[in-house]
Amino acid sequence: MSERQRDVTLRFLAEPGDVNFGGKVHGGAVMKWIDLAAYACSAGWSGKYCITAYAGGIRFVAPIHVGNLVEVSAKVIYTGRTSMHIAIDVQASDPKNLERRLTTHCIVIMVAVDEAGNPSPVPEWVPVTDEDKLLRDSAIKLMNMRKEIGEEMEAHVKYLKPDS
C-alpha cells in the first residue's frame, strides 16, 4: 500500500425507510452509517480488514430529516498497536441550500485483524498540527476514562449476579 488515507466522508440522502416513529431519521440508522464510515476510514489507514471494538460517547445533537443530504466524516485521531481511534461527525443539510448542521458525533475504536481474525498491527499515526495533537490527547484521555468505567462496571456486575 503506497499511501495511507487518514480520513473519509460518506455522503447520501436520508431515505423514508430510515424514519422512526417520530418522523425523523432513526438513531439506529445513524449508528449504522457511523460504523460504515469508521470501517472505511480504518481500512483505508491500515490497509486491512477491521472490526468495531467500541463505539461510545455518541451524541445526537440535532435531528436528521428524510430527504436531507447526510455527510458522515471519519478521521483517525490515535493509533495503538492494533487499534485506531476514529472521530466521527455527522452533518445534515437540505440539498437545496446545503447549509450543513452537526447532528451527531462520537468516537469509534476499530481493530485491524488478519485472515484468522487475530488483531494485526497498524501503522502509527503521528499528529503534526496543534489540532491533531489536541485530538490525540483527547483520545488518550477518553481511553483512560473508559478503562476506569470498565473497572467500575465489572464491580457493578459482580454485585448484580445472583448467588450461585
Image (cartoon, rainbow, N blue to C red):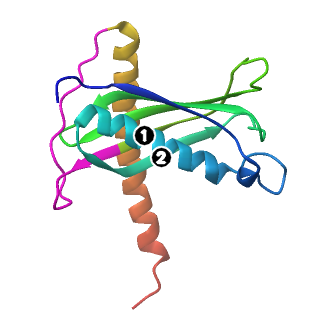
Q: Residues at badges 1 and 2 in contact (C-beta under 8 Å)?
A: yes
Residue 62 left/right relative to 135: right
Residue 118 forms part of the magenta stretch: yes
At x 28%, y 10%, the residue is 128
Q: Quadrant of the C terminus?
A: bottom left
Tag on residue 35? 2
- Residue 104 percent location from the top left of the image: 62, 35
Q: Nearer the viewer, residue 60 or 31?
A: 31
Q: Which residues are magenta?
A: 110-128
- Residue drawn at x 37%, y 43% is 109
Residue placed furthest toward the bottom: 164
Q: Is residue 156 magenta?
A: no
Q: Residue at x 16, y 47 (%)?
A: 120
Classify mark 1: residues with Cα within 10 Å, few (<14), some (14-19) or many (20+).
Answer: many
Q: How many angstroms separate mark 1 from mark 2 (CA)?
A: 5 Å
Task: Determine whether 126 is above or below 15 in the image.
Answer: above
Judge left or right: residue 38 versus residue 63.
left
Disc 2 residue type (three-letter): Asp
- In the foreground, 145 or 91: 91
Q: Which residue is mark 1?
A: 38
Give neighbour class at mark 2: few <14, some 14-19, many 20+ (Cα, 10 Å). Answer: many
Q: Point out residue 11 in the picture as x, y percentages from the top left corner.
A: 57, 32
Occupied quadrant, residue 142: top left
Q: Nearer the viewer, residue 83 or 6?
A: 6
Tell me residue 102's x, y (percent). 66, 26
Mark 1: secondary structure: helix
The tally of labels here is 2
- Which residue type does callout 1 highlight? Ala
Left or right of 37, for residue 1:
left
Assign the N terminus to one quadrant of the image.
top left
Magenta span dominant secondary structure:
loop
